[in-house]
Amino acid sequence: MVYMEISLTSLEQAIQTLEQQLDHETELDPQKLNTKYLGKRGLFNELSKQIKDISPKDRKQAGKLLNALKNSLQTKLGNLQLHKAEDWVDLTFPGTLPPQGHLHPVSQAIEEISEIFKKIGFTRARYPEVDWDYYAFGSLNMPPDHPARDEWETFFVDLPADKKMGKIVLTPHTSNGQVREMERLKGKPPIRMINIARCYRRQQDVTHTQMFHQFEGLVVDQGINIQHLKGTLDYFAKEFYGPGTKSRIRPFHFQFTEPSFEVDFSCHLCHGTGLIGGEKCSFCKSGWHEVGGAGMVHPNVLKAGGIDPNKYTGFAFGWGVERTYTLKEGLNIDDIRLLYSEEMRFFEQF
Ligand code: FA5
């Protein structure tokens, strides 16, 4: 066979030239560079074809040289790509925003609830969350040792009782603010209070936590009646849950209101019918969700606050913030304990 023999030396020179060419390369696009040097029809493959023109005795050495060249090209091109990626700044590219936190969903709910009541003239109040038995129970028409205290699964602070005020408790409801608000106004209505605070009870399951929040409304003035209470409930239902929502009151018993009610709001899924496509609504089961209690302020409570029950009447309500909030359309929170977990994937959704 006749062929133009190429010496090992000239192959070495060609290899050196190719390496130098890459060292002084002006092309910037990493992909184009790769194709130019290592592509199917690239410079390396062109050079490798010369191996067939090398004398058989030198071919093994020529193969080694070409392999070393390939490794060197790959390394240099790899480094070049990294380098180019670091250097490359697109000034028109939008910046990366730092991660941003937000208010806890319960704080968001408290803000929204406060705003809704502010629009109809309620003033936000805060009263102690660690308070005397007197404000949590005694002043609310529950004489000492009245068994109704048990209904609230109360945490009692292990300290001696005060003669007049009784023991210290972690307030199990925001109703402790009722007589405190009457005292603040020195027994002189009108009162339109919304008291939002933490409450504590010895309870824990999917709808109960040991620490939770309630919001307590109290209105006292001349001529206040159940219609004012019902109007307020309807107003809140529409503002918080949407225009189609209705409220309902059912007879109940609390020591501090007479008459007393449980308050329900219509379910947003079945619109109060209890049925979806002929089947029982799986969210509410009955068309309604209970959120808390309400009633007309008991005359004994008005008296405890220094208000004349023959002249003034009032209504009060107290609902769980978590309970009220988790019933909002689209939230679908079936375990309120999640609100007090450390599950960031849950909180990032709000
Ligand atoms: C009361 O606490 C009364 N003080 C409400 C009231 C105020 C009635 C003014 C009349 C006038 P009740 O124990 O039902 O009532 O609690 C009211 C609401 O608080 C419940 O419906 C629920 O929404 C919420 N709640 C009670 N316990 C817990 C708990 N452990 N975890 C979360 N929410 C709770």
Image (cartoon, grey):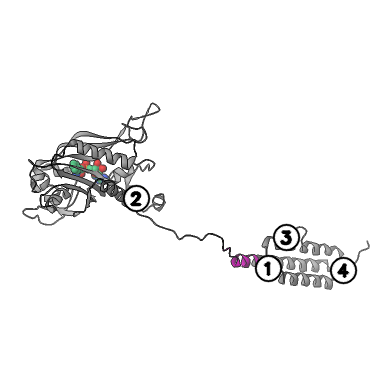
Highlighted magenta segment, given as a residue range:
80-93
* Nearer to us: label 3 or label 2: 2
* Nearer to us: label 1 or label 3: 3
Q: Position of residue 308 (x, y in %)?
A: 7, 44
- The image's mark for residue 76 is 1
Seen in the image, is 223 located left or right of residue 88? left
Residue annotated with mark 4:
6
Measuring 65% from the left and 67% from the top, which residue is drawn there? 80
Earlier sequence position, callout 1 versus callout 2: 1
Earlier sequence position, callout 2 versus callout 4: 4
Q: Amino acid at mark 4?
A: Ile
Q: Is residue 168 above or below residue 272?
A: below
Q: Position of residue 256 (x, y in %)?
A: 13, 42
Element type at mark 2: helix
Mark 1 neighbour density, 10 Å: few (under 14) some (14–19) many (20 or more): some
Label 4 – label 1 distance at C-alpha: 27 Å
Q: Amino acid at mark 3?
A: Thr
Q: Is residue 67 above or below residue 328?
A: below
Mark 2 neighbour density, 10 Å: few (under 14) some (14–19) many (20 or more): some
- The image's mark for residue 35 is 3
Q: Position of residue 267 (x, y in %)?
A: 33, 35
- The image's mark for residue 105 is 2
